[in-house]
Image: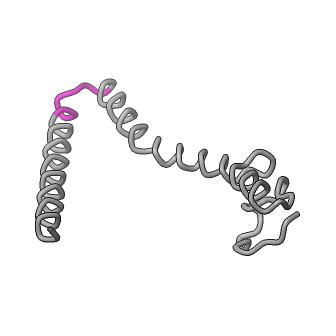
Amino acid sequence: MFWAVLGRSIAFAAVCVVLTMLLGVAIAVLMTKLGAVMRTVVSVGLLLAWSMPALTATIVWGWIFDTSYGLVNHLLTRVTGDNWMGYSWLINPCSSSPSPA
């Protein structure tokens, strides 16, 4: 079973690399054929497609650890019975074992 999964994983990785390279080359060739305005539009679109997952992850991370309405504070309040609402996880970088507020 292990060898079958390993073989599929390697094949999947190889296919992903090849398809990524082909898509990248195709976009590069396309951009050499475009005018300046359309090249800028395609570049901006590619930049936005690249940056949106990181931006989304940052927003969701901030929401989960929000001081007033965060999911972590809400769950800790429900599970422990202590009042964790208002505790700021993102202010103190060493808050791995905090005491409740």
Q: In the visual, does 8 lie left or right of 55?
A: left
Give how far across and how far down residue 7 sits, in percent. Answer: 11, 64
Quadrant for the C terminus, please.
bottom right
Please name whichever residue, 57 or 47, is drawn nearer the observer in this view of the structure: 57
Q: Residue at x 85, y 61 (%)?
A: 82
The magenta region covers 30-36
* Displayed quadrant of residue 65: bottom right
Give how far across and how far down residue 68 sits, in percent. Answer: 81, 47
Q: In the visual, does 5 lie left or right of 42?
A: left
Q: Residue at x 79, y 56 (%)?
A: 77
Q: In the visual, does 71 lie left or right of 18?
A: right
Q: Residue at x 73, y 71 (%)?
A: 95
* Displayed quadrant of residue 87: bottom right
Q: Is residue 52 magenta?
A: no
Quadrant for the N terminus, please.
bottom left
4 shown above or below 37: below
**Count of residue discs:** 0
How did the renderer colour the structure?
one colour
- Classified by dominant secondary structure, the portion drawn in magenta counts as helix
Q: Is residue 35 magenta?
A: yes
Give how far across and how far down residue 35 sits, in percent. Answer: 25, 25
Q: Residue at x 76, y 45 (%)?
A: 69
Give how far across and how far down residue 43 sits, in percent. Answer: 34, 36
